[in-house]
Image (cartoon, rainbow, N blue to C red):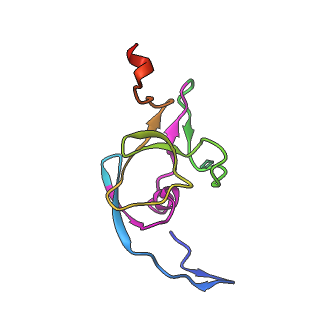
Amino acid sequence: MRVEEHPILGKLQKAPAVEIEVDGQVIQARAGEPIAAALLAAGKHIFRYTRKHHQPRGVFCAIGQCTDCMMIVDGVPNVRTCVTPVKPGMKIQTQHGLGKLRSTSVDKD
Ligand code: FES
């Protein structure tokens, strides 16, 4: 469900529809909207599971100030999806725990 007509702003202009992949499932999104908005519109409310107790988390603050909406986006963990815009063809995964950090030269020493 999306807000298409606002009581003050009136009828909202629609951005072009694009497809993104979420946990292997293709969903419709609007180019440029936050990833979290696309997921909520598609009925997905669990974005990650906590490391220690494996508790589900989803949108909490929606302004990029907490960590509850973090997911793996195009292979990059810990992406705050409430402030990250949709791009066509993105691959998004539910994150379990902290996510893996990329290896660095320090890891190899
Ligand atoms: S919901 Fe808090 S950072 Fe996204």
Question: Residue sitting at 56 percent across and 33 percent down?
Answer: 55
Looking at the image, the residue that sits furthest to the bottom is 10
Quadrant where the image shows the C terminus = top left
What number of labels is visible?
0
Image coordinates for residue 89, horizontal then vertical, percent? 31, 58
Quarter of the figure with residue 52:
top right
| Residue 11 lies in the magenta stretch | no
Image coordinates for residue 36, horizontal then vertical, percent? 51, 56
| Residue 46 lies in the magenta stretch | yes
Span shown in magenta: 26-51
Looking at the image, the residue that sits furthest to the right is 8
Q: In the rendered view, would you say 91 is above or below 2?
A: above
Looking at the image, the residue that sits furthest to the top is 109
Q: Is residue 75 left or right of residue 12?
A: left
Question: Residue sitting at 53 percent across and 29 percent down?
Answer: 54
Image coordinates for residue 66, horizontal then vertical, percent? 65, 43
Near-viewer residue (75 or 7) = 75
Q: Is residue 81 left or right of residue 28?
A: right
Image coordinates for residue 12, horizontal then vertical, percent? 55, 82
Q: In the rendered view, would you say 74 is above or below 40?
A: above
Q: In the rendered view, would you say 78 is above or below 10?
A: above
Q: In this view, does 6 lie to the left or right of 88?
A: right
